[in-house]
Image (cartoon, rainbow, N blue to C red):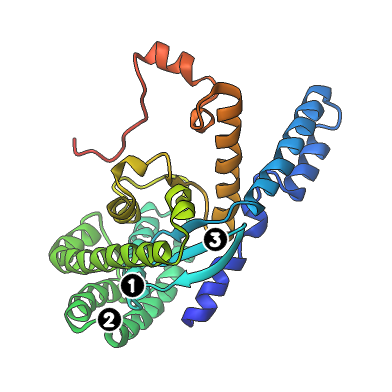
Amino acid sequence: MSPQNRRSFILSTGTVAASILGQTEGALAKQDHAADPVAQLNLQFRTLYGVNREELLLATPLAALTLIGTGEIWRIEFGKAVKSYPPIPWIVHAKGLMHGVIGTQATWARLMRGQAPDTAREATVTLTSGLTEAASQAAKQLPAKVATAASVVLETLRKLAAGWAAGKPTNAAEFPDSLTAIKPKLDQVLTAAGEAVYESIVRGLKSCANDSDPQAWGTCLVGVCGVGFARRDNIEIAAAMSVLGRDALGTRLLYLENAFTIQAGITQIGAALADRELGQAVFGDPYRMWRDLLGDVAVQHAGGGFFPEMGRPS
């Protein structure tokens, strides 16, 4: 996929899924709760709020968004993506390597589980083909030092997949042992990719700031679009903190869950803006609605503010 096509894909897909209270959701809610007067009343109030949210977004001069793993910054003016600050080009190919690892582990796990052995075995053929293509792209697109490490990783995975496709049985140790052997090479690729993403985000945000009115830049929201199960120690957040300052985290710098496209991120930025406005008007605290509405009771029972921390070494 060319950079231009990729950017168009990032911008245009997932629009319906991005809607927080769009026409589709509203229609479904009316259908599901047609006989429930309380639900209908709540929907009426939320729809009024949704109109304000959309108007507020269209009146907001500046925001910035990035989609995890791309290193690309998008400039948002009045609810529209108007400019892209491109990343270091080879990042997408390094990310593809990790997807190859994910696909191989998943296929091995299916073979071990044995619930659908025929379809799992068919998947090994697709996996082998994909890893062969990924290795070819990596050799052409990655910097030389990164390409050398990537080729070791991908060739190891390809041999595993090819063996399974040929009917070779696997076992509980095969995949973990293979990954242990190549982990230094995998770490080398991930470190290089992390540095490239970090550099791209910092450069993109600084360029966005330089292109902006200082007042608009000083108050704009910066969002990192990503999966619902938010990753700890996110590289995009770290890079953005170096530009905005650590105190921007949770006030101007936000992780936007379940936002898989820039369009979805724009919708969520609108929701954050409206909730910030509501929080100030109702509670005198612009960030109150970014917490659970019943959060004060939760804090009282929990003995302080909290959020589950995942992924810590045991």
Q: Distance between the residues labelled 2 and 3?
A: 30 Å
Residue 60 % position (x, y): 59, 52
Where residue 142 is drawn, which disc sits there?
Answer: 2
Near-viewer residue (47 or 206) = 206
| Left or right: 285 in relation to 16 | left
Instruction: Kindly report which numbered mark, 2 or 3, lies closer to the viewer in this rendering.
Output: 3
In the image, residue 180 sits, relative to residue 90, either above or below, namely above
Q: Is residue 134 visible?
A: yes
The residue depicted at 41 percent of the width and 55 percent of the height is 114
| Number of residue marks | 3
| Left or right: 85 in relation to 135 | right
Q: Can residue 226 be seen in this view?
A: no
Q: Which amino acid does label 1 sit on?
A: Ile
In the image, residue 200 sits, relative to residue 162, either above or below, namely above
Q: Distance between the residues labelled 1 and 2?
A: 8 Å
| Left or right: 84 in relation to 37 | left
Residue 26 % position (x, y): 77, 43
Q: Which amino acid does label 2 sit on?
A: Leu
Labels 1 and 3: the sequence-earlier one: 3
Residue on which disc 3 sits: 76
Residue 141 % position (x, y): 31, 84
Instruction: Say what secondary structure mark 2 lies in.
Output: loop
Q: What residue type is labelled 3?
A: Ile
Residue 205 % position (x, y): 38, 62
In the image, residue 107 sits, relative to residue 246, either above or below, namely below
Q: Residues within 10 Å of mark 1 (few under 14, many from 20)?
A: many
Q: Which residue lies furthest to the bottom in this view?
A: 140
Instruction: Say what secondary structure mark 1 lies in.
Output: helix
Labels 1 and 2: the sequence-earlier one: 1
Residue on which disc 1 sits: 91
Labels 2 and 3: the sequence-earlier one: 3
Q: In which quarter of the image is residue 176?
A: bottom left
